[in-house]
Image (cartoon, helix red, strand yellow):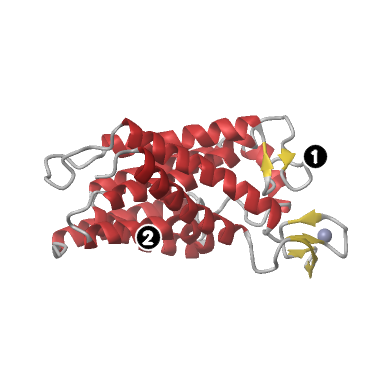
Amino acid sequence: LTPIQSTDLLVAGLLAGGFALFAALLRLLTFSGALAAFIVGFLIFAFGGVPFAVPLLAFFLSSSLLSRVGRVRKAHLDDLVDKGHTRDAGQVLANGAVAATFAFLSWASPNSRNYLLLYLAALAAVNADTWATEIGTLWRGKPVSLATLRRTEPGMSGAVSLMGLVAALFGAVFIVLVGRLAWPAASLRFFLPVDLPEGLAIAWAGFTAAFADSVLGASVQAQYRCPRCGAVTEKRLHCDVPGGVTRGLPFVNNDVVNFVASGLGVLFAAILLYYFANPR
Ligand SMILES: [Zn+2]
């Protein structure tokens, strides 16, 4: 194994710390969220270097930007959905833990380029899901709930709209394109850049995982009814009182669903890459 240079560790710490601080100051992240982002960012920058850091920053910056767009229209969602727009540690880890694992595996397997491909798939899944939510909720049309197949409120877990699906597809393709641009130059191990069949496999895996996120959101994710006001939401506490579970499993919140979806992105990509993209 190649030891990580102390200067690289320093750069990784400064970069991850800088972005976490920036995100906390802009209230994109809570304090715990910034701490988690620092840890995830530091691990990815340290173990993966630039080819891993750039797609992560593309995910972070694009989703931060999109969450700021149309904030007034999205404000009412904070009362319904599990998590608001200032992301906490649970959300950061749900989106970043699988990716950080694959940055580590890539460092630990110096002869394989596959972990970089699977890393991109983990990010493509969470980016597709985030773009779908942030762009999908901007549209006036009401999405369809996969649980009831009826129209529901935009932004609810398990709700899908045409615009959300298109956004998910673009979100997955975006990560593949950034990954291709940031592909390591001039190294024996990464001599072959991500090619078209591989890129299509990763993007499709990311898109499918984002859809699976909605399926899980409509089935196993907990939904509660507030005993005080009767509202059906994803919040365990509403009007300061705990609600009764009307659907799903009590321990499955949005973070659990996002974490599983990013793992599914990797799994789908591994299958597609193996069968359709000429394994190397
Ligand atoms: Zn209530």
Residue 150 is tagged as 1
Vertical placement of 11 versus 70: above or below? below
Q: Which of the 4 quarters of the picture holds residue 96?
A: bottom left
Q: Earlier in the sequence, mark 2 or mark 1?
A: 2
Residue 57 visible in the snapshot = no
**32 displayed left or right of 135:** left
Amino acid type, mark 2 = Val
Q: Nearer the viewer, residue 192 or 102?
A: 192
Q: Quadrant of ligand 1?
A: bottom right
Amino acid type, mark 1 = Arg
Q: Which of the 4 quarters of the picture holds residue 248?
A: bottom right
* Position in image of residue 33 (x %, y %): 48, 61
Residue at which label 2 appears: 40
Residue 239 visible in the snapshot = yes
* Position in image of residue 268 (x %, y %): 45, 48
Vertical placement of 179 versus 227: above or below? above
The quadrant of the picture occupied by the N terminus is: bottom left
Vertical placement of 23 versus 200: above or below? below
Q: Secondary structure at mark 1?
A: loop
Residue lying at 37% horizontally and 37% vertically, measured from the top left: 176
Please identify the residue farthest to the front as the structure is shown. 275
> Would you say the residues marked 2 and 1 are in contact, meaning their CB atoms lie under 8 Å apart?
no
* Position in image of residue 189 (x %, y %): 16, 48
Q: Nearer the viewer, residue 71 or 162?
A: 162
Residue lying at 23% horizontally and 37% vertically, measured from the top left: 193
Q: Secondary structure at mark 2?
A: helix
Vertical placement of 74 versus 224: above or below? above
Front position among marks 2 and 1: 1
Residue lying at 33% horizontally and 57% vertically, measured from the top left: 102
Label 2, label 1: how many angstroms apart (C-alpha)? 38 Å
**153 displayed left or right of 93:** right
**133 displayed left or right of 247:** left
